[in-house]
Amino acid sequence: MPGLPAVVLPPIIDRELLFGDPEISGAQLSPDGKYIAFLKPWKATRNIWVKQTAEPFSTARLMTTETARPIAGFVWTRDSKFIVYVKDNGGDENFNAYAVDPSAPAAPDTDAPPSRDLTNLSGVRVTLFSAPKTDPDVIYIGLNDRDKAWHDLYKLRISTGERTLIRENTDRIATWIFDLKGNLRLAQRVQASGDQEILRVDADSFTPIYTCNVFETCDPVQFHRDGQRVYIQTNKGSLDLSTLASLDPATGALETVESDPLQRVDLESAWFSEATDELIATVYEDDRERRYFTDQAFEADYQWLENKLPGREISVVSSTLDDRQWLISAHGDVEPGETYLFNRDDRTLAFQYKVREKLPRESLAPMRAVRYKSSDGLEIPAYLTLPKGVDALRLPALIVPHGGPWVRDQWGYNALAQFFANRGYAVLMPNFRGSTGYGKKFLNAGNGEWGTKMQDDLTWGAKYLVDEGIADPGRIGILGGSYGGYATLAGVAFTPDLYRAAVDIVGPSNLLTLLAAIPPYWEAGRKIMYARMADPETPDGSKWMEERSPLHSAGKIKTPLMVVQGANDPRVNRREAEQIVIALRDRGFPVEYLLAPDEGHGFARPVNNLAMFMAVEKFLAGHLNGRYQEGGSPEVTARLKEITVDPKTVVISKILDASTVGVPQVTADLKPGTYKYDANISMGGQQMALKLSTTIQDGGSAWTVVEKIDSPMGEMLDTTVLEKGSLTLKKRTVEGGDEPVSMDLDGTIFADGAGSNFVIGCLPLADGYSTAFRNFDLQRNKVKLMQLQVACSEKVMVPAGSFDTFKVELSSAGGGPDKSTIWIAKDTRTPVKISTVMAEMGGAVLTAELMP
């Protein structure tokens, strides 16, 4: 077997013990203390189980019966009656919420009680905002079914599934914040510029009470127990490190509570009592975690635990509502986690289970914090894990940049670090500039530095290992996922002589196509990404993106590369992987490609992870001369064969080009008449009422459509002439702005201007129907491509009555901000409701409903 002599290293750890399903994990104590719920495999898939607290785990009952994809996590309701969890489909990140009653009998012909789908929506991402103590049967959730970019606020009753709309989100609200009594008090808004605002929620408006710019942090944490003030985390203005402060929403008064006493790192989190809602402690993630207590009783109990479990970090995973029982995890760099039940009244500690119990702890390698200087002298914090049992001299080494990139690595058990250290590699995990946790200056030092100084931080990390004598300069590799995958591709493209092997996992290869394809629900962060990277909608920004995209330097790559991708990834879609695979293939350069058809942004199914790492470790060993585990289980071996793609077979469908898209075929024609709508524009908490009417006139060989808008600012007329039969746009005139606009068009523009929604109603609409067509951008004076999708059938109520409709979603094919949802009556094909994001007005939302 190739690699380092096995006699000095610990035995090879079976990758199943590192990346397979843990026997037991993720335990949560019920708020009444009577039960413990946890995750455990059932039919080779992680599911939820429940046992009585005092009973052994062998007595647990199965609660869920998922077989396609593991359940990632769950929560108890505050009354301990239900367990709520979310799941998506194949990694598409469109989550629905489910509830299961642990006291219910098993459903007929199954092994578990029935799970109820509380939201039951397709193509929608559910997000949880609040679970109030005052009504444990209620959770407040966000749904982006009306507008994919923004979540409307709903009250969801768990016992019945009843859903009540609380606030329609037409104001770019990213988060809704409730006080301790379950009252909606605050909202957090991202402005079109990327700047952030904390807003007081008044009866019919919003009042800004605290703002910070796009490069600062101002996040609500939790309301104070006095019901007046709210704790926030902020680094606004002259502050470098994020600080815990209290803010009075009524007056805007701000008072600093605490910042890092050592002035080294940002506030990581704040810990509050379940029983009293008092602030208990603050937490700071330095080289290791530090805690500062404000409650002596909690501090005494925590110190008692530290004495009983020395050398470990202690996390309180969950607690009872009275705070008298804690479920804790004791963990460290060579301990994935031991879980105990701690009774604070008599200070008894009852062992529950070890995470990955069969993993040989004696073979695991310590992780230590290191620091080194980058190209410009900036100090870079990092974590280094060295193989156990050998001298740290001229070892094969791996640089492992984290994803994000606006997150950080932390000290503790890390499966990747242990896996590769066991195979004989020195593993360096740098917190490069742009990582969070080290202050605003360090974070902002990464602005505009993708592929340049952020990449230098990795390059100088490799140099550090060489200068220290740890790494053999001829055996350094790089591996990362998401942004780490980008950094991997950038490493082999921009520093082609540094690395001898590279593994890119779900990393973007082309920054322009990455940003054009990000999911709509990232709209709140789009401008923040533009600010920290570059704005692709400007010439300079587009040039920046191109220069820093590894795809455009693929001709320089001479490092053996493996690319790993999930087919359903909504963040970094498979085009990012296949572009780079094709670029290398077409120049005759060898590249390996794994594509999992049932995964998204990263792999969740253990069988896919095991197959991936089976391939990865052999690939790296072949180029860096580390060691590897030969073979795997029959299931994993078969799976690796299934997800391995021959690069010769990779074909990318062309991105739709407006110049090549034809006119959709209509199956109906317009009907003469006048249609009136009650409309309003919402922006920044302000509402502006409008009257809108559409008049369709039969002009013989063509239709003439006049759309009239009456607003407080005056009257505007939009007139179109449409060819009969095709309904293509022949002429458009807009009056009522600074000056009239009139243009003759070539007959390939469709569903644009006055009457466009009526034209869409003439298409052969049906559930699942989709098409594309050309519009003309008046502001930019160029053709743009629009994509249309019938999302579902839906009953809607408007002033004109109740209608069975097709819910039609319209968006820019180029990833721009143009978004509309049109509800079209199935019987008459009349648009009865319209919701349109008006990009030219900074993201204002126009809503119109048909009048009688």
Image (spheres, rainbow, N blue to C red):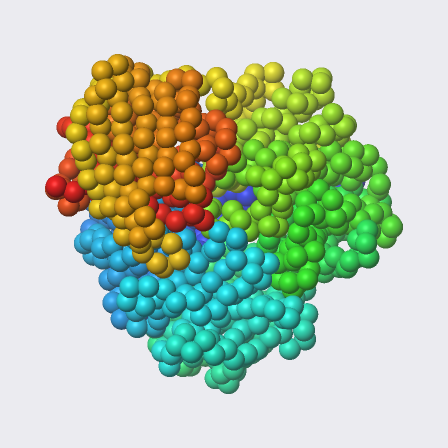
Residue, x 48% and y 26% (percent of image)? 783
Residue 662's place in the image compared with 556, above or below, is above
User: Residue 84 is drawn in which quadrant?
Assistant: bottom left
Q: Is residue 434 left or right of residue 849?
A: right
Residue, x 63% and y 46% (percent of image)? 533
Looking at this view, name the residue that lies furthest to the front: 739
How far across and down, in percent of the image, does residue 155 sit?
Answer: 26, 58
How far across and down, in percent of the image, does residue 725 sit?
Answer: 27, 14
Residue 455's place in the image compared with 292, above or below, is above
Residue, x 59% and y 19% (percent of image)? 646
How far across and down, in percent of the image, does residue 843 sit?
Answer: 42, 48
How far across and down, in percent of the image, does residue 575 sit?
Answer: 55, 28
Residue, x 23% and y 38% (percent of image)? 693
Q: Is residue 73 visible?
A: yes
User: Residue 164 is drawn in which quadrant?
Assistant: bottom left
Residue 383's place in the image compared with 416, above or below, is below
Residue 637's place in the image compared with 397, above or below, is above
In which quadrant is the N terminus drawn?
top right
Query: Quick one: 645 or 219, which is closer to the camera?
Result: 219
